[in-house]
């Protein structure tokens, strides 16, 4: 919408300067802002049948008046009007407070419509609305708007109607005509008239469909146009890697790659050899073999003469990845090294020199990688593991260490399709939706805290069989101090319960060196049980651990529980996860049930989204979700998919980028800052 040419809201009759100031608080400045202020819901005045109602429900009834209304006076100026109506063969008592004047209109035998809260036990309705006759078709659906304390709804409705009358026909149309035709969508102007005063349910549905589609369309347009614009402006040189060598490397692995791994590697290699920079999210359940895919991409980059960097959120994980990289890649001549914050300045300097001289091909590390003085000779590939642990800025800094390096993000928290389109719309997404053959699904049980003894008995059996176990302590959000104390207590208790076993203790307050020691001794099988806070959550790999006990499991979200559970089930033995919890909330119980029912991260993430709603899904780190006016990415999933596909087709056409082809969309994108230098995020 072109803001400059739009008349101010005071152009609407009845809106003065004072009202305009109040409207400004709702973000309404121009006439078009006013008309575009759509209702957030509708009050439903469709008449119902008494049989279909539940107790205390809000409902509308139509009936004939069966008794003279009577009025009682009580308190100061308070009145109660009562009368009976007959509706569908049932007698219902209607009560109206403080509107005694209605008495004259309610005559015996008259047809009336009443709306309010229905008391099923007493067959009584406390009415907010009473009027004679049947409701008109448009009266059955009343828009409800968000307002402030300074503006009342009746006023706002009147202004909107006035605004529509005077300017409704001038509402600009942004959507390309062929799309309107293809989906038989009303114009924006038509849709708005309908939205603000529905003529029928059916027409309202179409109008809403139009607005929802447009909201998704414009949002996707911003993301995809931005992505294309950025990439068209970069001069990335396609990587020329040695496909034969890459194939040889894959063939050298002691196992066959899954179909999903093959597919994803193909997608990644394709991106790397293209002249548009790769910006890809790789999602796959824990243990689905993402790291290996990453290492294959690294190897490809190295055969193209480039350096690669792999950034992970914790030192433990960095070490494990470095080991894995060393194991697979060293014999192929790839020089790998670790770079972490706990290294001495001298060690770091040695790494920097090696990087700058291109004596290193792959560097694996934590935040230490994005320090300003880390020099790369020719960084061609940047991989971020467990990407949700990093902020947007951190990921970008690493990327900027190369000249348009390809970027691959990895996550074990699968993102539901709807979310990946909305908040990762500027990335391409690859999914590994298959585990390597022969993995036994983890058996998950939900136990009440008073069953701890039995659980420990079970643990003893596993330990006697030579296996190992994790015990996860609940996170105490309020205080890291309590968090640590808690872990210390649980450790003490486990030691008493399992006196003949070695119990390790891990928490965030331990110095890095000690953490490493604890982890190493658990990985080597010296410690049999590891009591830990959630620091073991990401990526840690100890295949001999077959049991995970999670204290107060209901304090965790589904995604996190699934992450934790992924620490077991990584070897050949059957693994178990025990959720120790007595949730008081419905939601908590539901989460425990879902965990026992499925091991599929994609299913879990969809359920997580349903239970938490899109706003909470990513926590605050990464919300960045748009505030749609009418559209709901979860509910209107299909419209979202459709808009996404349409926008993708549009923005990848040369026509779209040729001057003057889509002037309105281009003006919209310019207004939105898409073609400016600063980044959107
Ligand atoms: P993720 O990073 O997705 O959690 P990893 O890459 O750590 O998973 O893989 C888990 C384990 O499975 C590793 O030990 C890895 O070597 C092994 N692995 C990876 N791909 C396969 C495969 N296709 N078949 C068998 N084992 C595999
Ligand atoms: Mg991993």
Image (cartoon, rainbow, N blue to C red):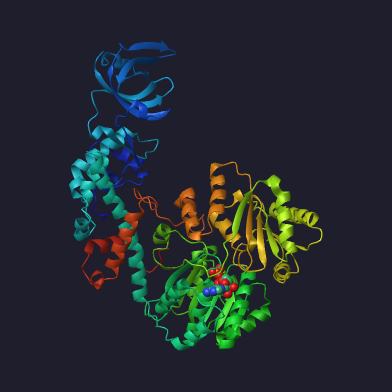
**Numbered marks: total:** 0
Residue 495 position within the rendered picture, expressed as x and y whole percent measured from the top left: 79, 57
Give residue 130's position: percent from left, percent from top.
30, 23
User: In front: 473, or 514?
Assistant: 473
Q: Nearer the viewer, residue 89 or 552?
A: 89
Q: Give the position of the C terminus as an image quadrant.
A: bottom left
Q: Which of the 4 image quadrants contains residue 287?
A: bottom right
Question: What residue do we see at 38% from left, 53% from top?
Answer: 633
Q: As displayed, is residue 428 above or below residue 576?
A: below
Residue name at image x 39 percent, y 61 percent: 421
Q: Is residue 236 above or below residue 132?
A: below
Q: Quadrant of ligand 1?
A: bottom right
The answer to whether any part of residue 504 appears in the image is: no
Residue 79: x percent and y percent?
39, 15
Residue at the spot 31% in from the left edge and 20% down from the top edge:
89
Where 580 falls versus 533 (above or below)? Answer: above
Residue 132 locus on image (x, y percent): 25, 22
Q: Quadrant of residue 158?
A: top left
Quarter of the rendering occupied by the N terminus: bottom left
Task: Report whether 301 appears left or right of 581.
Answer: left
């Amino acid at each position: 919408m072109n803001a400059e040419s739009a008349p101010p809201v005071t152009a609407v009759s009845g809106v003065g300067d004072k009202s305009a100031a109040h409207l400004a608080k709702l973000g309404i400045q121009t006439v078009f802002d006013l008309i575009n202020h759509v209702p957030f819901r509708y009050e439903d005045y469709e008449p119902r049948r008494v049989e279909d109602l539940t107790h205390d429900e809000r409902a509308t009834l139509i009936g004939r008046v069966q008794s003279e209304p009577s009025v009682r006076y009580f308190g100061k100026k308070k009145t109660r009007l009562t009368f009976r109506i007959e509706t569908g063969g049932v007698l219902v008592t209607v009560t109206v407070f403080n509107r005694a004047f209605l008495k004259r209109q309610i005559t015996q035998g008259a047809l009336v419509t009443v709306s309010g809260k229905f008391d099923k036990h007493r067959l009584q309705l406390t009415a907010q609305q009473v009027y004679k006759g049947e409701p008109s078709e448009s009266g059955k659906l009343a828009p409800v708007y968000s307002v402030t304390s300074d503006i009342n709804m009746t006023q706002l409705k009147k202004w909107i109607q006035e605004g529509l009358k005077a300017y409704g026909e001038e509402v600009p149309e942004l959507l390309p005509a062929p799309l309107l035709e293809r989906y038989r969508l009303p114009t924006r102007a038509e849709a708005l008239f309908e939205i603000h005063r529905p003529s029928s349910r059916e027409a309202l549905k179409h109008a809403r469909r139009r607005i929802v589609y447009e909201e998704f369309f414009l949002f996707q347009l911003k993301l995809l146009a931005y992505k294309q614009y950025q990439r068209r402006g970069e001069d990335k040189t396609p990587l020329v890697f040695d496909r034969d060598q890459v194939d040889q490397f894959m063939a050298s692995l002691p196992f066959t790659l899954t179909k999903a791994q093959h597919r994803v590697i193909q997608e990644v290699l394709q991106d790397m050899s293209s002249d548009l920079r790769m910006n890809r999210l790789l999602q796959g359940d824990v243990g689905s073999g993402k790291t290996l895919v990453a290492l294959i991409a690294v190897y490809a980059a190295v055969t193209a003469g480039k350096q690669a960097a792999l950034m992970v959120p914790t030192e433990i994980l960095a070490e494990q990845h470095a080991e894995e990289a060393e194991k697979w890649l060293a014999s192929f001549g790839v020089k790998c090294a670790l770079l972490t914050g706990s290294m001495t300045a001298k060690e770091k300097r040695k790494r920097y020199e090696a990087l700058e001289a291109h004596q290193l091909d792959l560097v694996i590390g934590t935040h230490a990688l994005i320090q300003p003085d880390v020099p790369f000779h020719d960084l061609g590939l940047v991989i971020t593991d467990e990407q949700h642990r990093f902020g947007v800025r951190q990921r970008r800094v690493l990327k900027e260490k190369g000249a348009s390096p390809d970027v691959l993000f990895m996550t074990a928290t699968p993102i539901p399709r709807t979310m990946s389109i909305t908040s990762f719309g500027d990335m391409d997404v690859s999914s590994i939706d298959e585990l390597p053959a022969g993995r036994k699904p983890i058996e998950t049980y939900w136990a009440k805290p008073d069953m701890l003894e039995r659980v420990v008995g079970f643990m003893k059996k596993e330990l006697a069989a030579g296996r190992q176990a994790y015990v996860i302590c609940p996170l105490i959000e309020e205080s890291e101090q309590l968090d640590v104390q808690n872990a210390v207590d649980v450790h003490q208790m486990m030691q008493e319960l399992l006196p003949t076993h070695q119990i390790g203790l891990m928490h965030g307050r331990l110095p890095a060196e000690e953490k490493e020691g604890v982890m190493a001794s658990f990985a080597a099988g010296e410690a049999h049980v590891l009591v830990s806070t959630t620091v073991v959550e990401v990526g840690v790999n100890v295949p001999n651990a077959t049991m995970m006990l999670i204290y107060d499991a209901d304090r965790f979200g589904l995604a996190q529980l699934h992450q934790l559970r992924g620490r077991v089930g990584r070897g050949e033995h059957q693994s178990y996860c025990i959720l120790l919890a007595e949730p008081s909330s419905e939601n908590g119980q539901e989460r425990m049930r879902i965990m026992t029912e499925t091991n599929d991260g994609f299913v879990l993430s969809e359920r997580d989204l349903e239970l938490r709603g899109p706003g909470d899904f990513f926590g605050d780190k990464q919300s960045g979700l748009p505030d749609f006016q009418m559209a709901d990415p979860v509910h209107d999933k299909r419209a979202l998919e459709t808009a996404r596909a349409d926008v993708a087709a549009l923005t990848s056409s040369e026509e779209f980028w040729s001057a003057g082809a889509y002037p309105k969309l281009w003006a919209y994108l310019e207004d939105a800052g898409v073609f400016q230098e600063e980044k959107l995020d």
